Image (cartoon, rainbow, N blue to C red):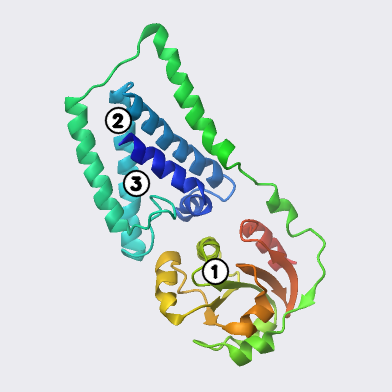
Amino acid sequence: MGAVFIFSGYTKLYPIEPFEYTFVDLGFINWQIAPFIARLMIAAEFIIGILLILHINLKTAYKLAIATLLVFCVYLILLMIIVGNKGNCGCFGTTIQMTPLQALIKNIGMLGAFAVLYKMHPGWEWKDKKRYLLLIPIVTSLTMPFILNPVELDYSQAYLNKPEENFKLELDSLYNNATLSIPPKTLSEGKHVIAFMSLKCPHCRIAAKKIRIMHERNPDISFYFVLNGDEENLKPFFEDTHTENIPHCMLLGKSFVYLAGMDMPTIYLVNNSIVEHWVNYIDLDQSEIEKWMEQ
């Protein structure tokens, strides 16, 4: 049981962005606080796992584990109500794909096991002078997520201000060769965030999840997806990212590479067909985009 918690926490660390976005998606945590909350939740999983494996203060570990599992169960139930039983719930990061229902069944099974253990196996209680030794696994667990995958927030104020050479995005190539749906001619006018993504690229899916949350929080930001890949991969992509409501089209072969290049995802901030900023998905910041939209 302890190994499951440690494995669960570790798999969320790489990549950690989908787990961070989960807290923003809940609606009461902003983009700046979410990276810290995500790492503290991972730290809690590490603490629970270490206490269970060492059989130390198991009563406390059981209570923490049960509380954590109940929180995850509530989240999974809400997720199924809002978007249905589809996509990856993220319980084991991107290492093991699980639907919300599969994860809920797993959590209920673990809750049952902890209920039995709570009655049958109290473990060792460290008291008096030995109690301070508990600080070692606790401090180690709290610091590990921040050391293994440090928080980076300085990009939000800088990425839109770095000097770049503006270039024209040849949208005629998109209009003439897109499939699935015809891109609106209005993409050539005004400001838009155009993201070029491959359907099977894991980083593209992370970027799409982040953009979905931004789109829900501010529908006035004009996002558009240009997707590349086999149409049979469209359904898995949308089930995982829940971005089917964001305007999109398919663009294949040389036409896609001509506009997007080889690195995925490619995210352009376009003003009247001119790419003013070329942004990495990790650096994509809602408040900075809103400032750019208003300029």
Is 240 drawn above or below residue 41 in the view shown? Answer: below
**Residue 253 can be seen in this image:** yes
Callout 1: SS: loop
Q: Is residue 214 visible?
A: no
Q: Position of residue 148 (x, y in %)?
A: 56, 39
52 shown above or below 108 = above
Mark 2 or mark 3, earlier in chain: 2
Separation of marks 1 and 3 at Cα, in angstroms: 28 Å
From the image, tell me which residue sits under label 2: 63
**Kind of element beneath mark 3:** helix
Residue 116: which disc?
none
Classify mark 2: residues with Cα within 10 Å, few (<14), some (14-19) or many (20+).
Answer: some
Task: Please state which amino acid type lies under the numbered disc 2.
Answer: Lys
Residue 134: x %, y % from top left = 42, 19
The disc at residue 72 is 3
Quadrant in the picture for the C terminus? bottom right
Task: Looking at the picture, tell me which residue is in the foreground, 192 or 148.
Answer: 148
Q: Are marks 2 and 1 in contact (CB under 8 Å)?
A: no
Which of pointers 2 and 1 lies earlier in the amino acid sequence? 2
Q: CA distance from mark 2 to mark 1?
A: 41 Å
Q: Nearer the viewer's eye, disc 1 or disc 3? A: 3
Residue ranking furthest to the top: 129
Q: Spatial distance from mark 2 to mark 3, Cα to Cα?
A: 14 Å
Q: Which mark lies nearer to you, 2 or 1?
A: 2
Q: Residue drawn 73% across and 57% down?
A: 159
| Disc 1 target residue | 219
Residue 257's place in the image compared with 45, above or below, is below
Tag 1: amino acid = Pro
Residue 101 lies left or right of residue 240; in this view the side is: left
